[in-house]
Image (tube, rainbow, N blue to C red):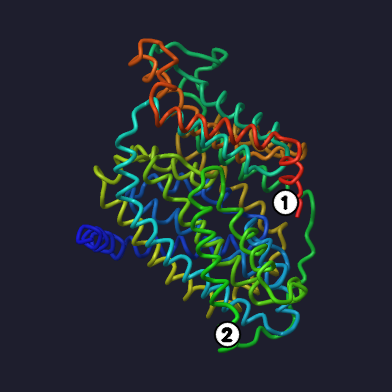
């Protein structure tokens, strides 16, 4: 216990330095902004801002990127409540009851309870990360190349099962990602592979190029495709502080939502997205009068918003302790860490404790900042919602091109983000979800490395993956999950859940 508090005080010492406080504030502000503006998600924004982090200290860079991620969860609820357009995929559920509350003149109360629930959930999630950090890192140190390979296979299977749409399409996307990760120079022989003799492919496809094209550029094209009518609230927002009765109705949903979100966020394969949906379904089942839901029930805002923020933060656990990104945003974090020469995984805690604990402490500080940014400045966010998208997209495109050129000063990189932008747009049009591809790309290199090491140690015997109990257990879980997900009845139920 003494170690725990010593570590936390080390973390706050790092997080409360003026430069890191400034970066946390900047991250939270940008996160709220992109959460508020529909059509610019955290994945696209983090991909666009990766080049800026090159000049920063690794700890400060990750504190800022983390702030963008959980800040977007806060901002997404603002648009969902005021405009009925979720700024974030996870805010879809908040729009159901939040917008109805706004139409009844209770927009302020909905925003207030969303912010309070998010702050509470964020605080609990930060403590969960701090508490689980040390034991999980201890467990991860037992892992060898064999276990790591099996763990990544299980992570990718989770990504398939939890991906929206067809399972076969999700598998195809992961395999394409893994295939793209093999472009470049062979790890051991130094031979070029799949470069088609093009010198700029000798080092492989740059992570930032792929992410910015598939998410940044493709997102712009998708938003230009369908113009959204924004029905900005004309009524007064009203008081922001919920009444005693509102608190009485909300405190249990906030506790339940925090618990559900924290658990689902740890799951590899984007479990954090399922948190708000699961919390909303649970609240509806437990309600004395389920008909209130969809008509302005405050529980329908409190539960999902708490789950949303708790999941966003606990998804850092697999990344920081095992080095496995559970979703596309965390895959971008892996990219940011490797850019700064940090290998994500159990070594981060032992070799770089200031980064690990500084980032955890910054999350609590960031949640406090978000409470201050969101509630008093709500009028400013409402005004921003009136900015038409046609004025925003040229700036986004310009920012992408300048950012990607500044990394390697290669004109081919700018052409590549255009190419991947078209590919990403085509994938969305044909019903493929690009997020699993990014996970496949990030984990592909790590999987290949660990597979080769495991085979070298076992002198080429594949039995090593079954002989070692942890590895065998992880592969068994992956196989069972895949078989269950492919069963017709389960698949039908899964499709219905995602459609809802």
Q: Is residue 413 left or right of residue 151?
A: right
Label 1 belongs to which residue? 497
Q: Nearer the viewer, residue 303 or 291?
A: 291
In terms of image quadrants, where is residue 383?
bottom right
Q: Secondary structure at mark 2?
A: loop
Which residue is found at the position 63% from the left and 55% from the top? 40
Q: Nearer the viewer, residue 30 or 325?
A: 325
Within-10-Å neighbours for mark 1: few <14, some 14–19, many 20+: few
Locate residue 457, reporting x and y percent.
33, 16
Q: Is residue 362 left or right of residue 287?
A: left
Looking at marks 2 and 1 on the same chain, the residue that comes earlier in the sequence is marked by: 2
Q: Secondary structure at mark 1?
A: helix
In terms of image quadrants, where is residue 100?
bottom right
Which residue is found at the position 36% from the left and 58% from the top? 360
Which residue is found at the position 68% from the left and 44% from the top? 164
Please, is residue 452 above or below residue 256 in the view?
Answer: above
Locate residue 307, reporting x and y percent.
55, 62
Count of numbered tags: 2
Q: Nearer the viewer, residue 473 or 5?
A: 473
- The reply to whether dot 2 and dot 1 touch (C-beta < 8 Å) is no
Label 2 belongs to which residue? 242
């Amino acid at each position: 216990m003494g170690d725990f508090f010593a570590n936390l005080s080390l973390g706050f010492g790092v997080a409360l330095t003026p430069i890191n406080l400034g970066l946390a504030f900047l991250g939270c502000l940008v996160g709220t902004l992109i959460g508020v503006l529909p059509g610019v998600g955290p994945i696209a924004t983090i991909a666009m801002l990766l080049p800026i982090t090159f000049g920063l200290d690794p700890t400060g860079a990750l504190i800022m990127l983390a702030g963008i991620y959980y800040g977007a969860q806060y901002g997404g609820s603002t648009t969902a409540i005021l405009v009925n357009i979720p700024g974030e995929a996870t805010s879809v559920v908040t729009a159901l009851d939040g917008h109805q509350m706004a139409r009844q003149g209770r927009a302020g109360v909905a925003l207030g309870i969303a912010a309070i629930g998010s702050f509470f959930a964020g605080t609990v999630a930060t403590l969960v990360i701090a508490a689980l950090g040390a034991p999980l890192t201890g467990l991860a140190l037992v892992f060898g190349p064999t276990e790591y390979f099996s763990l990544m296979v299980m992570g990718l299977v989770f990504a398939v099962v939890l991906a929206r749409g067809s399972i076969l399409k999700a598998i195809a996307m992961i395999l394409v990602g893994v295939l793209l990760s093999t472009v470049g120079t062979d790890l051991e022989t130094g031979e070029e592979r799949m470069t088609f003799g093009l010198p700029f492919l000798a080092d492989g496809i740059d992570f930032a190029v792929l992410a910015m094209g598939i998410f940044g550029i493709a997102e712009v094209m998708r938003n230009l495709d369908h113009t959204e009518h924004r029905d900005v609230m004309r009524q007064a927002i009203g008081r922001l502080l919920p009444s005693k009765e509102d608190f009485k109705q909300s405190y249990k949903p906030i506790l339940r939502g925090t618990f559900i979100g924290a658990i689902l966020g740890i799951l590899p394969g984007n479990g954090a997205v399922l948190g708000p949906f699961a919390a909303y379904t649970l609240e509806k089942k437990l309600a004395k009068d389920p008909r209130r839901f969809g008509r302005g029930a405050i529980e329908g805002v409190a539960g999902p918003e708490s789950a949303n923020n708790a999941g966003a933060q606990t998804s850092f656990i697999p990344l920081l302790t095992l080095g496995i990104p559970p979703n596309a945003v965390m895959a971008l974090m892996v990219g940011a860490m490797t850019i700064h020469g940090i290998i994500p995984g159990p070594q981060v805690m032992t070799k770089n404790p200031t980064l690990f604990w500084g980032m955890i402490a910054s999350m609590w500080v960031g949640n406090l900042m978000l409470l201050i940014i969101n509630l008093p400045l709500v009028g400013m966010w409402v005004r921003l919602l009136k900015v038409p998208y046609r004025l925003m997209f040229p700036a986004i495109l310009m920012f992408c091109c300048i950012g990607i050129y500044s990394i390697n000063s290669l004109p081919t990189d700018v052409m590549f983000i255009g190419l991947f932008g078209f590919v990403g747009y085509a994938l969305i049009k044909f019903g493929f979800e690009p997020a699993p591809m990014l996970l496949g790309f990030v984990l592909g290199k790590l999987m290949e490395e660990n597979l080769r090491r495991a085979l070298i140690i076992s002198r080429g015997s594949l039995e090593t993956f079954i002989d070692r109990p942890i590895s065998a257990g992880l592969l068994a879980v992956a196989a069972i999950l895949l078989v269950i997900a492919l069963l017709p009845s389960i698949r039908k139920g899964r499709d219905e859940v995602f459609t809802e």
